[in-house]
Amino acid sequence: MLRTALISGLLLLLINSVVLGQAGTIRGNVFAEDTREPLFLCNVHLVNSTWGIATDENGYFHLSKLESGPCSIIFSSIGYVPDTVNLVLTPGQLITRQVFLKPSSQIIREVIVSASKILKQTQVQASMVQITPRELNRIPQIGAEPDLAQYLQTIPGFVHSGDQGGQLYIRGGSEIQNSFLIDGIPVYNPFHSLGLFSVVDTDILQSVSVYSGGFPSDFGGRISSVMDTKTRDGSIAQVSGKMSFSTLGLNAEIEGPITKLPVFKNSSFLFSGKTGLINSLAPIIYPYTGSAGIPYGFTDLFGKLTKAGPNGSKISLTGFRFSDEVKVDTSLTYNWVNYGLGCNAVIVPNNSSGLIQASLSYSSYEINWNEFDRPTRFSSIESIKLLLESVNYFGRNELKTGVETIGMSSRLNYQNLYGFNLKEDLNSTDLALYIKYKMILGQMIIETGIRGSYYATMGSFIPEPRLGFKMNVTEKLRIKSAFGYYSQNLASVRSDQDVVNYFSGFVLEPTGIAQSFGQYQARNSLQTAWHLVAGIEAEPFKSIQVTGEIYGKYFPQTITLNRNKRFPDDTQHASVPDIFTSTFLSERGWAYGTDLQVQYSSKLIFMQITYSLAFVRKFDGIQYYYPHYDRRHNGNLVISYYFGKSCSPWEVNARFNLGTGFPYTPVTSYYDKIDLSDYSTNSVLEPGSAYGVLFGEINSARLPVYHRLDLTLKRILPLKRNGSVELSFSLYNCYNRKNLFYFDAASYQTKYQLPVLPVIGIKYIHK
């Protein structure tokens, strides 16, 4: 396998060593002049032509196959003064240019969509949302900082299961089927137990590319969605930072050049940390939440070092430690920790038509669950990943090839409801080769690719074809579609039939899958899915953008925990049906629906309306059922309004969410439990004090409708010297809606989600 990976890597280098022909090429990077940070989504437009592109996360741009002679290129980005570069190209010439844009002295409130519009006209972007810190600031922030977790809940197709331990479910996929990457490093639990916060600080983000389906061949290892997070580089111009405090948490960030020594020229650092305070402050500030308060705590640490070269090449080192802890009195404690370390390199060869990217990363995750009178549940997973990728440009067309290898190990100690212990200690080695080619033919964009995934431990090779298409019908109307096949070898011990289950353990290539139970039999221990997406993008008016998609996901095989396992799978129980002896079951699933998003933006107002209609269903071989995250209707309204002086603006943000209830298994009846062991008395003839519970069909009933309103008021106060202060007041669940979280049928207790929470925040920014 290693030999194959090395040969593939050499082929990538050979592809990238193609010397430019007679056409001219202009490439380079765009930076902010004040901080020297790369500018993402900077508009690069060739004058007197319809050709325009947007810079990537590294500020990189590339224009090839240009005619010889004089040419002019305009560089423009929100908040910066545009700049024009005039050049004279000779046949076969390759020009590398670094461009530095000056910050604009005027605060621009209007949302300029030129760069995003160029992306929409030159990229397929089916079921894809590009998020920058600018978008994150439009939603109500619960605390002193906006957060990615809160923004993702407003994207159509995303379902949030609740405030207490909530997870995100994306277009019918479970949380184990979603990939979350930070600078290419896998993060196995990106959201904290409270459900309001992600592990990544908003101020360190460069961009987040969210694929809710139909993602291209350069992503793999998951069968539902991908959230690819890129962090920005630290400033190489000066030391700066910020500190924020709210009744929910404390946050700090610092960045700057490493030193002024020549050997560290163009080198920078970026460090960030945040911790939750709600567990300690809630009994004081929110006494109405009860004696236990809100027992959730977290601590997130992140660091990045970057060294940039003169021609756009760079190398960076990223590290993080994310942790979460829940402590409900002495009856339940729950905690997890995720470590990650990665090295990323971008190489821009001198005589090549593209660039080379390489990364090496390590990630580990461990979760512990301790419950009174029950054995400890434990799970851990480790992974080492190596990626080598080549990107080549042929005019407006692009070729990307890559090889990825990942070694993983998982451990699990788990006891199910019937007291049966499951212990697993597994390892796997996987190799993937992929190729993706994007070509622009007139008004058509075609993105085709294939990914070959080889699961070496089980000896299975899975070809995964991918196809994307977009037609620019007019400048303001586009249609798009995507199709693909996906596979993964990672399974979870959280069952889709559970309404509430905080513990989510991991199993690699699980064994003990039922082979004689139900209608469908597992061919291997992989999970697979087909995706089909079709949609439109339109700008009927200058200030309005409309996006609509219909989608379907078919899961031919998903591996889920068998909740009915009561006996070991051995010769002594050979006559017992698989339903009672197998550890895992093979299921089939279907998810389909439609998503709609309408955005309106002007100088003072931003408004976004989203609506999702979704259907998710599974079949375990005997019965059909709705998984616990099947929400039929889900809608969001987000409004941002700006007012006041431009030097000291006010901002009001509001978000209203309305969703139909989740499925749950209803109780059909209660009955008296009779203790037959005490037959010497007449107690068997007396009414019992204990009750038994009889349940109906799995998830055949629905919880009440969920709705919630959040508000935020912010004001920025500039300081006389190098900085500003941002004051905020947030009101979570404004009208104190009692949204039902869970009904415990055994104890007949109702548990609600978070009540109204007023939050005061202050943030100091030093520049």
Image (cartoon, rainbow, N blue to C red):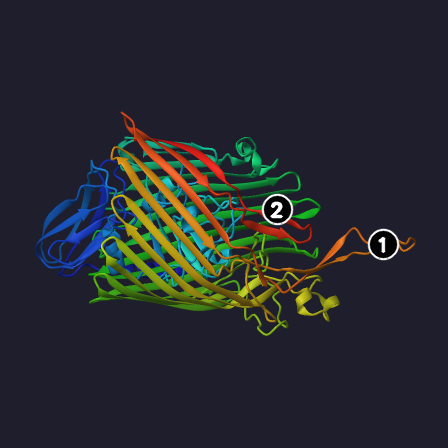
User: In the figure, residue 250 lies in which quadrant?
Assistant: top left
**Residue at x 10% of width, y 56% of height:** 48
Residue 541 in the image: x percent, y percent?
23, 57
**Residue at x 42% of width, y 49% of height:** 656
User: In the figure, residue 566 lies in which quadrant?
Assistant: bottom right
- Residue placed under numbered mark 1 in the picture: 686
Which quarter shows the C terminus?
top left
Amino acid beneath label 2: Trp
Between residues 267 and 212, which one lies in front from this camera angle?
Answer: 212
Q: Spot the residue most to the front.
A: 735
Between residues 195 and 322, which one lies in front from this camera angle?
Answer: 195
**On screen, residue 38 above or below 260:** below
Amino acid beneath label 1: Glu
Residue 746 in the image: x percent, y percent?
69, 53
Residue 116 in the image: x percent, y percent?
26, 53
Separation of residues labelled 2 and 1 (CA atoms): 39 Å
**Residue at x 44% of width, y 47% of height:** 149
The answer to whether any part of residue 177 appears in the image is: yes
- What kind of element bears circle 1? loop
In the displayed structure image, the side of residue 350 where residue 506 appears, left or right: right
- What kind of element bears circle 2? strand
Graded by Cα atoms within 10 Å as few (under 14), some (14 to 19) or many (20 or more), the crowding at tag 2 reads many
User: In the figure, residue 425 lies in which quadrant?
Assistant: bottom right
